[in-house]
């Protein structure tokens, strides 16, 4: 801040408030003019609330959003079981696959807890349907319990993809998890026991 302006303000303050007020005013001006003094404040992009998530990987939705999207999809296909959920559009949209009692797979898109597309029935043969039924029957942990196990393994992570799949002769929940620094972790949970069977740690 220009020293002439500070001097003028100090002079005006002397006339109106005395020395005590001068000291307070000088301290206030020094804090405002110094980039390192006082409490640092983040500069947010125009129109973005201070508590808004930032753009990029950190924007992806959290466990609460995943479960809300999953519940909306399951409600749209009564009696179904979720087998896959993945974030799209940088976390604003969830692509969900559920399997009905007969093994038929349905795809839905969910945004803000509401189904915006689907359910669309996938064209699968009898073998595909039988495989879906077998995996669903083998999974003692549903998607929500699996998500809790995964986030316990990566406490600050956000699940961007969760799939019921087969691995080494067992049924597992496979997941991609992104931490606040943008690093991806690959986690697999035994769908029968709940044990973490794969944790690749950090991958680029």
Image: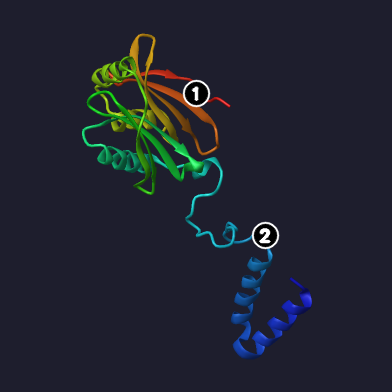
User: Which colour style is shown?
Assistant: rainbow
Q: Which residue is mark 1?
A: 201
Q: CA distance from mark 1 to mark 2?
A: 38 Å
Q: Vertical placement of 193 versus 30: above or below?
A: above
Within 10 Å of disc 1 (Cα), the crowding (few <14, some 14-19, many 20+) is: few
Looking at the image, residue 33 sits to the left or right of residue 55; the answer is right
* 138 and 29: which is toward the camera: 138
* Left or right of 60 on screen, residue 164: left
Q: Position of residue 188 (x, y in %)?
A: 40, 21
Regarding residue 66, the answer to whether it shows in the image is yes
Q: Which quadrant of the structure image shows residue 159?
A: top left
- Disc 1 or 2, which lies upstream in sequence? 2
Mark 1, mark 2: which one is toward the viewer?
1
Position of residue 161 in the picture relative to residue 23 (left or right):
left
Residue drawn at x 58%, y 27% is: 204
| Residue receiving disc 2 | 35
Res. 144 mark: none
């Amino acid at each position: 801040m220009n020293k002439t302006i500070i001097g003028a303000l100090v002079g005006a303050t002397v006339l109106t408030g005395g020395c005590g007020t001068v000291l307070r005013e000088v301290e206030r001006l020094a804090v405002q003019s110094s980039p390192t003094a006082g409490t640092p404040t983040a500069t947010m992009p125009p129109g973005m609330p201070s508590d808004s998530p930032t753009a990029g990987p950190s924007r992806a939705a959290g466990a609460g959003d995943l479960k809300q999207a999953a519940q909306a999809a399951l409600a749209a296909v009564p009696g179904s079981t979720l087998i896959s959920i993945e974030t799209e559009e940088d976390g604003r949209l969830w692509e969900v696959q559920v399997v009905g009692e007969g093994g038929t797979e349905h795809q839905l898109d969910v945004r803000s807890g509401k189904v915006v597309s689907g359910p669309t029935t996938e064209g699968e043969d009898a073998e595909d349907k039988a495989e879906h039924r077998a995996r669903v029957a083998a999974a003692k942990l549903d998607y929500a319990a699996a998500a809790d196990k995964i986030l316990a393994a990566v406490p600050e992570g956000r699940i961007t993809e969760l799939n019921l799949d087969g691995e080494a002769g067992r049924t597992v929940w496979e997941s991609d998890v992104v931490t606040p620094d943008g690093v991806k972790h690959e986690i697999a949970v035994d769908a029968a026991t709940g044990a973490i069977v794969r944790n690749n740690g950090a991958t680029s």
